[in-house]
């Protein structure tokens, strides 16, 4: 959840670290800090609660000088967002300086025994025990990097740590425990960097190597030396990653999220490229190149994810069951991992995680791995943790997504899942060739249809002041669009801080209907499909109780205007792809209401882009 950056090279470290923190701020933004060592090893440590701008303001006239340093942007787990609790943390003598991401599960015991030895703590964080633990080994004459390795051996939980020492300026020592919190080493010209995630490294280098759980790295004298935490040397070659500088800038848009919403047509084209042939109307997934015999033996598919990725998993069940006729289930990763699920080698587990770092999704994948399931993961970045656990990876190809709320990664998750269902259905013979061709041909229209859905935002702008003061919303959907009702409610909650619930429309009568009054808007997702009439009955029930209905309906069917108070139209398409188009009004409604309420759209309070702790 937190963002870490480290620099060891020839340039001034502070500007590079601050720029890196800005690129990582989506990971956590309740406080930020920086530590720089000058050539003699004298440390300058600055930390400030609140957003990065608070730290940058403090430093604007006096950037610390030095060519080695670390920085941190925090998402609090232990201890509130105060200056003291901000990272970096130091030992008693301010000689060991540490930034940390994760949770030290046994920090209470470690802290108590260090206090008993005479160490003095200044924060309420779990992280502060790490520099003191390293210090305790240095006191026993361990060299710096050995002291870090020994400390790593005592810490429990999933953690990523970078440490520097005033006694060895120029050296960065980092380790990773478990799966949470990525650490990527960047190989620049005459310099090395280390960060939680690629956006902080890409302005400096495209050559990177990932640290896996149980590994450590020492950056010194332009070389990166890798070892396991048992002390065995490892050779790692950097890989070259693509970087589109344009996608890292907001351009003409007010927010990254708005830009990312508008990038969806192009993101979908990228997702289809090479996977769909529009000449012979075929789907070919090279990333899921299992034999037809293996496809035939799949007797169950389990879709896993959290948050928006979980909502995508729910849609996927509809597609896979209807096109491939395989029994499917979906589960929230955090529930799946603890319920001892019944899965075996004939189960296909499909995990969805745009970040590839979500702790619960990783743990659930490990559970599936232990039980021998076949695994495919969907992820936006190559080389992340989820891609290491699953045998097969489909990249989302959405490009950098900086807004904390997922938008284009959701739509591209849907596309990948739809292609998967078509591919498996075709290979199992449950999808008729003519139907297959119909579905594939429609995919060619999808970017254009998304463009149409995005063309005019004036209606959303007009609705924002009408509904922006409401405190509760209900989102209703049926069938394949029920998960989109969940997604609409999630988007509204996270962006605008308005309470919202997504419900299967029929469920409304079993409780939520008692909430309906003239103060609670109901967003009804009702494209013209087989369930339209049922949705119509549901909104009439809402209207009969004085409720206000915002219908999201299919263009060209204006009779809905007799029943709903407001209507937002989406282009006509088959019910199969309607969830992809339905994503747009869910995003834009939430975006414009949040904007009108003055909320921080790109970095909503309390959230983080990758949730690397349980
Ligand atoms: C969605 O807008 C949120 N940012 C959140 O629910 C997110 O989808 C969830 O944390 C899962 O993230 P992942 O896809 O990176 O695993």
Image (cartoon, rainbow, N blue to C red):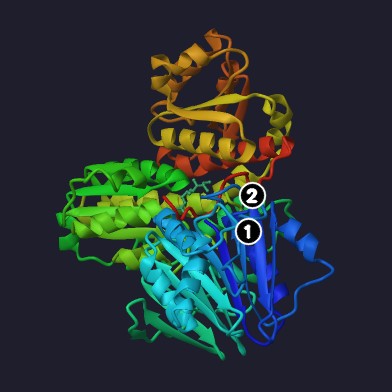
At which x and y percent is residue 65? 75, 79
Residue shown at 65%/51% (left/top)?
82
- Quote the CA–CA distance across marks 2 and 1: 8 Å
In the foreground, 88 or 596: 88
Say which mark, if any, is on residue 603: 2
Q: Is residue 383 visible?
A: no
Residue shown at 49%/65% (left/top)?
130
Against 198, is 368 above or below?
above
Q: Quadrant of residue 547?
A: top right
Q: Is residue 82 visible?
A: yes
At which x and y percent is residue 57? 80, 60
Residue shown at 56%/79% (left/top)?
206
Against 244, is 32 above or below?
above
- Ligand 1 within 8 Å of the CB at mark 2: no
> Within 10 Å of the Cα at label 2, are there few (<14), some (14-19), or many (20+) other Cα atoms?
many
Q: Are marks 2 and 1 in contact (CB under 8 Å)?
A: yes
In the foreground, 64 or 521: 64
SS class of the residue under badge 1?
Answer: helix
Lower sequence index among marks 2 and 1: 1
In the foreground, 39 or 232: 39
For residue 9, side relative to residue 418 (left or right)? right
SS class of the residue under badge 2?
Answer: loop
Q: Quadrant of residue 317?
A: top left
Against 15, is 85 above or below?
above
> Within 10 Å of the Cα at label 1, are there few (<14), some (14-19), or many (20+) other Cα atoms?
many
Residue shown at 48%/12% (left/top)?
514
For residue 489, side relative to residue 455 (left or right)? left
Say which mark, if any, is on residue 25: 1
For residue 159, side relative to residue 244 (left or right)? left
At which x and y percent is residue 481? 43, 35
At which x and y percent is residue 87? 60, 61
């Amino acid at each position: 959840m937190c963002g870490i950056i480290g620099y060891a090279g020839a340039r001034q470290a502070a500007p590079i670290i601050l720029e890196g923190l800005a690129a990582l701020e989506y990971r956590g933004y309740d406080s930020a800090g920086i530590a720089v060592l000058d050539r003699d090893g004298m440390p300058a440590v600055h930390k400030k609660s609140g957003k990065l701008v608070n730290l940058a303001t403090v430093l604007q006239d006096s950037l610390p000088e030095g060519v080695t340093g670390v920085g941190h942007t925090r998402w609090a787990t232990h201890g509130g967002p105060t200056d003291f609790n901000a990272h970096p943390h130091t030992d008693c003598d301010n000689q060991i300086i540490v930034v940390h991401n994760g949770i030290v599960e046994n920090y209470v015991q470690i802290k108590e025994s260090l206090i008993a030895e005479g160490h003095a703590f200044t924060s309420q964080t779990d992280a502060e025990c790490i520099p003191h633990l390293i210090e305790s080994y240095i006191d026993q004459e361990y060299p710096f990097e050995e002291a870090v390795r020994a400390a790593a051996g005592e810490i429990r939980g999933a953690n990523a740590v970078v440490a520097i020492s005033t006694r060895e300026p120029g050296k960065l020592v980092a380790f990773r425990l478990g799966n949470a919190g990525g650490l990527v080493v960047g190989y620049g010209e005459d310099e090395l960097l280390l960060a939680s995630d690629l956006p902080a490294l890409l302005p400096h280098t495209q050559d990177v190597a990932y640290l896996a759980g149980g590994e450590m790295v020492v950056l010194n004298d332009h070389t990166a030396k890798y070892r396991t935490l048992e002390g065995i040397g490892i050779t790692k070659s950097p890989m070259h990653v693509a970087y589109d500088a344009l996608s890292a800038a907001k351009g003409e848009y007010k927010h990254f999220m708005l830009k990312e919403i508008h990038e969806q047509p192009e993101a979908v084209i990228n997702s289809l490229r090479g996977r769909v042939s529009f000449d012979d109307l075929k789907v070919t997934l090279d990333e899921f190149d299992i034999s037809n015999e293996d496809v035939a033996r799949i007797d169950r598919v389990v879709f896993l994810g959290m948050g928006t990725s979980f909502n995508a998993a729910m849609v996927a069940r509809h597609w896979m069951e209807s096109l491939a006729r395989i029994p499917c289930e979906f589960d929230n990763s955090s529930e799946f991992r603890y319920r001892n699920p019944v899965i075996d080698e004939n189960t296909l587990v499909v995990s969805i995680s745009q970040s590839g770092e979500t702790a619960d999704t990783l743990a659930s994948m490990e559970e599936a791995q232990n039980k021998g399931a076949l695994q495919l993961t969907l992820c936006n970045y190559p080389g992340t943790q989820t891609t290491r656990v699953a045998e097969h990876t489909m990249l989302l190809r959405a490009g950098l997504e900086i807004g904390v709320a997922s938008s284009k990664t959701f739509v591209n998750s849907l596309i990948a899942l739809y292609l998967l269902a078509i591919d498996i259905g075709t290979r199992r013979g449950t999808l008729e060739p003519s139907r297959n061709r119909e579905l594939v041909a429609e995919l060619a229209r999808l970017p254009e249809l998304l463009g149409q859905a995005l063309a005019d935002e004036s209606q959303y702008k007009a609705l924002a002041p009408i509904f922006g003061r409401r405190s509760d919303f209900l989102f209703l959907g049926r069938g394949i669009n029920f998960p989109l009702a969940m997604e609409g409610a999630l988007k509204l909650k996270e962006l605008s801080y308005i309470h919202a619930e997504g419900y299967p429309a029929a469920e409304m009568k079993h409780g939520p209907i008692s909430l309906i009054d003239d103060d609670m808007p109901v967003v009804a997702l009702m494209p013209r499909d087989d369930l339209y009439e049922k949705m119509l009955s549901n909104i009439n029930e809402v209207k009969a109780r004085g409720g206000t209905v915002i219908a999201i309906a299919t263009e060209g069917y204006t009779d809905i205007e007799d029943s709903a108070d407001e209507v937002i139209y989406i282009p006509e398409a088959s019910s199969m792809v309607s969830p992809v188009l339905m994503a747009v009004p869910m995003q834009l409604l939430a975006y414009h209401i949040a904007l009108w309420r003055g909320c921080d759209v790109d970095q909503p309070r309390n959230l983080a882009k990758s949730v690397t702790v349980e």
